Image (tube, rainbow, N blue to C red):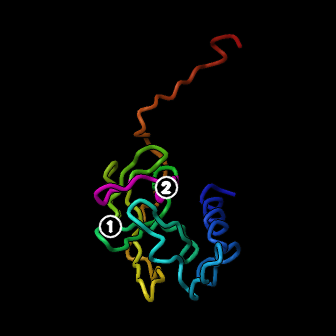
Amino acid sequence: MGFRDLLKRSVKKALGREGKANGGSSSSGGRASLPPGAVAWDKDITPTRHGQVVADGVGVAIFRIDGGLLAIDNACTHEDGPLAEGECKDGVVTCPYHDWRFDVKTGQCLSHANRQVGCWDVEVREGAVYVTGQRTKASPERGGAHDDGMAVLTRNLDEEGT
């Protein structure tokens, strides 16, 4: 099982939807179940609490920006870090793993050209959030330099005799 599969499974479990790719009902703490096809309640997504949902079998991060909801792929195009867990300021989310930055409105990667994440259409109906389709695709590339400022130390054990 790869990291993306583990992430998807964790998101589904957290939403009470294990085994369902999208839609269906979920209840938590005595609250009303979501309508079929809805992924979250509008009131649960705030400027500081982002949504992590699964739409069409893909992890999606939902952000509240300027009063509206915007959605991008939840997996960073560097090493699949969960973007919904990153800090979002002025419409730019920073990956919590290695600090790659993405414009939530366009999906463009501000850290490395041509490494965009996909954007998704979002609708709110009667207080429920629906991810209605993918608007743009993500870069298929993964990996690359880290921007977290931490150096990776390596040594050749054969040369040191250990």
Q: Callout 2: 10 Å neighbours few (<14), some, many (20+)?
A: some
* Mark before the other along the chain sequence, 1 or 2: 1
Between 46 and 153, the one lying in front of the other is 46
Find residue 137 and report its horizontal and vertical position in percent.
41, 69
Residue in the foreground of this view, choosing between 75 and 37: 37
In the rendering, at what x and y percent does residue 109 appear? 34, 55
Which residue ends up furthest to the top in the rendered image?
A: 161
Image coords of residue 72 (percent x, y): 42, 67
Q: Is residue 138 magenta?
A: no
Residue drawn at (42%, 61%) of the image: 139
* Residue found at x 59% / y 59%: 4
Q: Is residue 54 above or below residue 117?
A: below
Q: CA distance from mark 1 to mark 2?
A: 15 Å
What is the span of residues highlighted in magenta in the rendered image? 80-93
The amino acid beneath tag 1 is Ile
Q: Considering the numbered disc 2 on the image, is that residue within a helix, a strand or a loop?
A: helix
**Pointer 2 residue:** 85
* CA neighbours of label 1 inside 10 A, class few (<14), some (14 to 19), many (20+): some
User: In which quadrant is the C terminus drawn?
Assistant: top right
Kindly indicate the quadrant of the structure image that contains residue 115.
Answer: bottom left
Name the residue carrying label 1. 65
Picture quarter with the N terminus? bottom right
Q: Which residue is at the front of the view, 23 or 110? A: 23
Q: Amino acid at mark 2?
A: Glu
Residue at 42 percent across and 38 percent down: it is: 148
Where residue 64 appears, as percent x and y from the top left, is 37, 68
